[in-house]
Amino acid sequence: MTSVDGPTGLTGAAEPGRPGPGTDPTSTGPVPAGTTHTLSDPSRDTAGVGDAFRAGGAADVGGSATPSGTGEVPGAAPGAAGPGGWSADAVPPGSWSAGPPVVWQQPEPDRLTRFVLRLHARSPRWAAPLAALGCVAAGMAYALVSDPTTSDPDAPPSCLLKLTTGLDCPGCGGTRALWYLLHADLPAAARHHVVFVFAVPFLAYLFVAWAGKQAFGWRLPELRLSSPVIGGFLAVWLAFSVLRNLPWAPFTALYV
């Protein structure tokens, strides 16, 4: 490395293959007067200038960084261009901006969502349990009125899987089991869908505990169902759905 125009710089003609005095080896133009830099190795990649900026300050061609880290050249006017061509107020390419943080804004809800939110905010505490109870009562009323135990297998509404393939789906027999439960015939209900009959007491308690807490503030003991318990129940339900379609005894007794 040979100093050109520093305090101890040499004067005279340039060596063969070397730029002359006052010439930037990485630039096509002359270096401003009063700027100190050194000659870099010609094989050095000029991308090192950007690396120096990202490391915390502007650097000249020889690699010396400015103490301010703003891209200003010592002795140059404020806002003047630095060695890399950036002004003191500019942000070098590839570096992070020092601007304010970006705050994510939630999108505005649509009309239906706003209507539901307003309705939920204005409705009393007992409205949601009453609506759920109405849905359950409607299902029971349909089972009582339609009497699925005497209807034909293809009578509407019918199970699409059973109508097209003749196989029982996982829910086949549930409506008939509900009808027998409402008539206090537990063996017949279990005969049509034993998994449904087993789940009814748990579902009823969960509903009563939730509705009582919502409407009246009751503090009934919570029925905590862990993931393994739910997974085990679903596995039993799947096995029951497969076994009831097997054409051998005693599985044929489960077919409805």
Image (cartoon, helix red, strand yellow):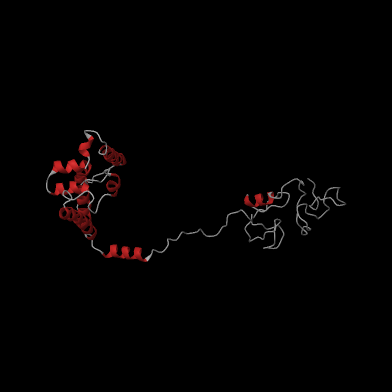
What residue is at 27 percent from the left and 48 percent from the top? 163
Residue 113 vs residue 44, the one in the foreground: 113
Q: Position of residue 49 (x, y in %)?
A: 69, 51
Residue 107: which quarter of the image? bottom left
Residue 61 image point, x, y percent: 73, 51
Q: Position of residue 140 (x, y in %)?
A: 18, 53
> Is residue 56 visible in this depiction of the protein?
no
Instruction: Tell me which residue sits at (22%, 37%) in the image.
Output: 252
The one nearer the camera, 151 or 69, is 151
Left or right of 25 in this view: 162: left
Quarter of the view holding residue 185: top left
Total marks shown come to 0
Q: Can see residue 251?
A: yes
- Left or right of 62: which side holds 181? left
Q: Residue furthest left?
A: 184
Q: In the picture shown, does residue 119 fall above or below 6?
A: below
In the picture, the quarter occupied by the N terminus is top right
Left/right placement of residue 3 relative to residue 254 reads right
Q: Position of residue 100 (x, y in %)?
A: 52, 60
Q: In this rendered view, identify the residue nearer to me: 148 or 126.
A: 148
Farthest residue toward the top?
249
Q: If the image is split into quadrants, where does the C terminus sit?
A: top left
Q: Is residue 77 above or below residue 191?
A: below
Q: Quadrant of residue 224?
A: top left
- Residue at the right extreme of this rendering: 13
